[in-house]
């Protein structure tokens, strides 16, 4: 996995995050499960699609940002460990530990 800096605006604020890129089935599937790492993750998909995120076996709350093909946020949700589920249409999904 490589790192990438993601910048976007949300509600008038500029946000920049350095994240590890997860661009294959295995890294996207595992995500933050069983991890204590505070490093954000960027999931990259081949095309925009409906992307579901669950928090099973994730030990920390996450801010999840669904981004379109132009890296513009289409949805943001704070998700709680073990119980949250969310989805949105995106080409990229950013998980930021809180």
Image (cartoon, rainbow, N blue to C red):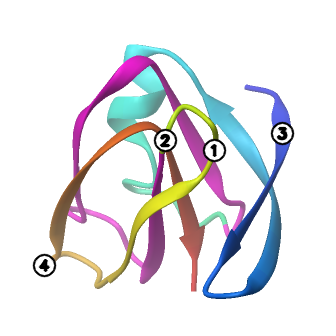
Q: Are marks 2 and 1 in contact (CB under 8 Å)?
A: yes
Q: Residues within 10 Å of mark 1 (few under 14, many from 20)?
A: some
Q: Where is residue 17 drawn, in percent x and y? A: 80, 63
| Alpha carbon distance from label 3 to label 2 | 16 Å
Q: Which residue is mark 1?
A: 71
Q: Nearer the viewer, mark 4 or mark 2?
A: 2
Q: Secondary structure at mark 1?
A: loop
Q: Which residue is mark 3?
A: 4
Q: Nearer the viewer, mark 4 or mark 3?
A: 3
Q: Residues within 10 Å of mark 4 (few under 14, many from 20)?
A: few
Q: Secondary structure at mark 3?
A: strand
Q: Earlier in the sequence, mark 4 or mark 2?
A: 2
Q: Which residue is mark 4?
A: 83
79 relative position to 76: left or right: left
Write down the region rendered in magenta.
38-67
Q: Residues within 10 Å of mark 2 (few under 14, many from 20)?
A: some
Residue at the limit of the structure toward the front, as seen here: 12
Q: Which residue is mark 2?
A: 68
Q: Where is residue 36 drawn, in percent x and y? A: 57, 67
Q: Where is residue 8 drawn, in percent x and y? A: 74, 62
Q: Secondary structure at mark 4?
A: loop
Q: Earlier in the sequence, mark 3 or mark 2?
A: 3
Q: Are marks 3 and 2 in contact (CB under 8 Å)?
A: no
| Alpha carbon distance from label 4 to label 3 | 28 Å
Membership of 56 in magenta stretch: yes
Membership of 54 in magenta stretch: yes
């Amino acid at each position: 996995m490589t790192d990438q800096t993601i910048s976007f605006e949300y509600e008038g604020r500029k946000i920049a995050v350095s994240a590890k890129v997860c661009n294959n089935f295995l890294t996207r599937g595992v995500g933050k499960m069983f991890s204590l790492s505070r490093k954000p993750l960027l999931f990259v998909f081949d095309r925009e699609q409906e992307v579901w995120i669950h928090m099973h076996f994730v030990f920390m709350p996450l801010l999840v940002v669904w981004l379109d093909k132009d890296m513009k946020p289409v949805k943001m949700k704070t998700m709680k460990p073990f119980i949250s589920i969310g989805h949105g249409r995106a080409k990229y999904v950013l998980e930021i530990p809180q």
